[in-house]
Structure formats: structure tokens, C-alpha cells
């Protein structure tokens, strides 16, 4: 599983603009808004964003 911050798509739960995406094997994707994001997905997405900033 990989989690990233995004601005593309809508939350699968409520339809609000998505802030986070959970990428699973087989091309499956779940999108979450700020309100519905699970804590583990948010933590992993924040860590991924921080790593990307360090590379720049």
C-alpha cells in the first residue's frame, strides 16, 4: 500500500474534493477528503510528501 497527497478526484465516502489517495496493488485506488481519511493513510501520505521535499 502506498499513500499520497492529491488534489485529483473526489472522496469515495462523501464526494468532497480528495486530499489523500491510498494506492493498492492491482491498480485499486481509494480517495479521501480531510474529514474521512484514516489516520494510517494520512501519516503515510505526510511521510511520502516529506521524503519528496527532501529529494528536491
Image (cartoon, rainbow, N blue to C red):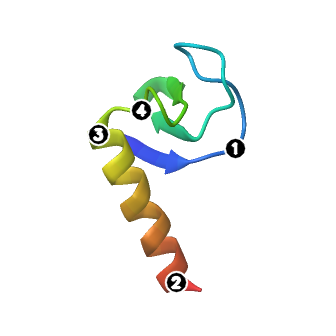
Residue 16's x, y, as percent?
66, 23
Residue 19's x, y, as percent?
58, 41
Q: Nearer the viewer, residue 16 or 21?
A: 16
Q: Is residue 39 above or below residue 14?
A: below
Which quadrant of the view contains residue 51? bottom left
Task: Give the mark, 1 or 3, whose residue is nearer the N terminus.
Answer: 1
At a point 52% along the width and 84% down the height, the residue shown is 55
Q: Is residue 24 above or below residue 53?
A: above
Residue 15's x, y, as percent?
65, 16
Label 4–label 1 contact, CB within 8 A? no
Mark identifier at residue 47: none
Name the residue carrying label 2.
Answer: 55
Which quadrant of the view contains residue 24? top left
Callout 2: helix, strand or loop?
helix
At a point 50% along the width and 23% down the height, the residue shown is 28
Label 4–label 3 contact, CB within 8 A? yes
Name the residue carrying label 1.
Answer: 7
Cα distance in 3D space between marks 1 and 3: 18 Å
Task: Give the mark, 4 or 1, whose residue is nearer the N terminus.
Answer: 1
Would you call the spot at circle 1 few (<14 residues within 10 Å), some (14-19), or many (20 or more)? few
Name the residue carrying label 4.
Answer: 37
Name the residue carrying label 3.
Answer: 39
Q: Which is more foreground, mark 2 or mark 1?
A: 1
Amino acid at each position: 500500500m502506498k499513500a499520497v497527497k492529491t488534489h485529483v478526484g473526489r472522496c469515495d465516502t462523501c464526494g468532497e474534493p480528495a486530499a489523500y489517495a491510498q494506492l493498492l496493488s492491482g491498480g485499486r485506488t481509494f480517495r479521501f477528503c480531510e474529514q474521512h481519511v484514516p489516520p494510517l493513510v494520512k501519516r503515510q501520505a505526510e511521510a511520502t510528501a516529506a521524503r519528496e521535499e527532501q529529494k528536491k
